[in-house]
Amino acid sequence: MKLKNKITAFFKKKVTKDSAANALVKLEELQKKYESLQQEFSALKSTNHYYNYLSNRYQMMAKALQNEVFGPPEWPPSPKKKLTDREIQAFTSNGESVMTFDYKDLRAPKNYALIYTDEEIDHFISKIQKQISIEPGKRDPYQWHIYGSLDGHVSDALQDFSIRGQDVLNIGSMTPWYEAMLIYFNNHPVTVDYNKIILKTKRMSFLSAEEFNNDPRRFNVSFSISSFEHDGLGAYGDPLNPNADLESMNFLKQKVVKNGLLFLAVPIGKDRIDFNHARIYGQKRFPKLIKGWEIIRTYGLTSNLWESGGDNQPLFILKNQ
């Protein structure tokens, strides 16, 4: 009845010439806005098609050049798609973590290399400079390059801890974004990765996994941003190992001096393994990961994250005990 009364009252209202004219003006304004949005949408569709065309073209050209320079691709073994009950128990620590299955094949040919150039590093540095010039509370996290607000936390932490003039050990890399951030703050990144990286710059260094194992140096500062959670799950062609992440952290501990720092980011949430490509670290697995390290500061960590789905990666500043 209430709705009926409202409708009746509406139609009983006296419609004046002025109100009708105002309504017509507003309708015309809305029509213009609609037409403008239609034009913007059409332009975006056209631009998107163009960029898709360019992306596909450059990918095909890159593959052709890779074959010419490096030869036919030499692939690591295909990732395992299924686990035995015993393997599931080992990976979940007898049920401490939940396991979901989200198979991915993220392998790269063993004989293909990434190429990092001064031009790419300078491009990233210009983006970093622009973001840092904005007050922290007013920055748009989507204007960072990789992980949004996490990139801002890394930048803030490098300033807060006055990391300058250091050889900084960086574990894992697919693009020189974090290397560029370290370079911006006058550091020299030493990147370690299983994939070979060809450097067209003298502002950073690269070590293969084998070279790193045999390198006698110990570092005052180390970086691992979204790396350890992938270890031992097979998506990148690496051998299955339920404790590869813990073993990698323990080995890193030997490469960092006593009281040295580790800037660490991994997904935080309820303990879970998304087989075959990622771990989510909760209140059971995370203490095992950082055993022997002391948390001295966090960025972006809130108590509710431990009960989340693991979509966020806060930054932990750890000290080697």
Image (spheres, rainbow, N blue to C red):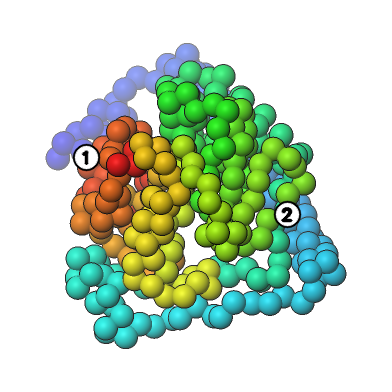
Residue at (53% x, 73% y) in the render: 237
Residue farthest toward the top in the current orientation of the protein: 18
Q: Earlier in the sequence, mark 1 or mark 2?
A: 2
Q: Quick one: quadrant of the C terminus?
A: top left
Tag count? 2
Q: Is residue 134 above or below residue 49?
A: above
205 shown above or below 231: above
- Residue tagged 1: 303
Per the rendering, the mark at residue 198 is 2
In what quadrant of the picture does the N terminus appear?
A: top left
Residue furthest out toward the front:
216
Q: Is residue 259 above or below residue 78?
A: above
**Left/right of residue 73 with respect to residue 278 in the rendered view:** right
Residue type beneath disc 2? Ile
Q: Can residue 266 be seen in this snapshot?
A: yes
> Residue 88: image x %, image y %?
28, 78
Residue furthest toward the bottom? 84
Mark nearer the viewer, 1 or 2: 2
Q: Vertical placement of 225 versus 165: above or below? A: below
Q: Quadrant of residue 276?
A: bottom left
Residue 17 in the image: x percent, y percent? 47, 16
Q: Mark 1: which secondary structure? A: helix
**188 or 62, nearer to the observer:** 188
As measured in the structure, the alpha-carbon distance from the residue carrying label 1 to the one carrying label 2 is 41 Å
**Which one is in front, 26 or 124?**
124
Instruction: Provide residue 183's location: percent of width, then percent of height.
Output: 62, 33
Left or right of 159? Residue 205 is right
Residue 179: image location, x then y, percent? 60, 40
Residue shown at 20%/56% (left/top)?
Answer: 284
Label 2 SS = strand
Amino acid type of the residue tagged 1 in the rendering:
Ser
Residue 251 appears left or right of 132: left
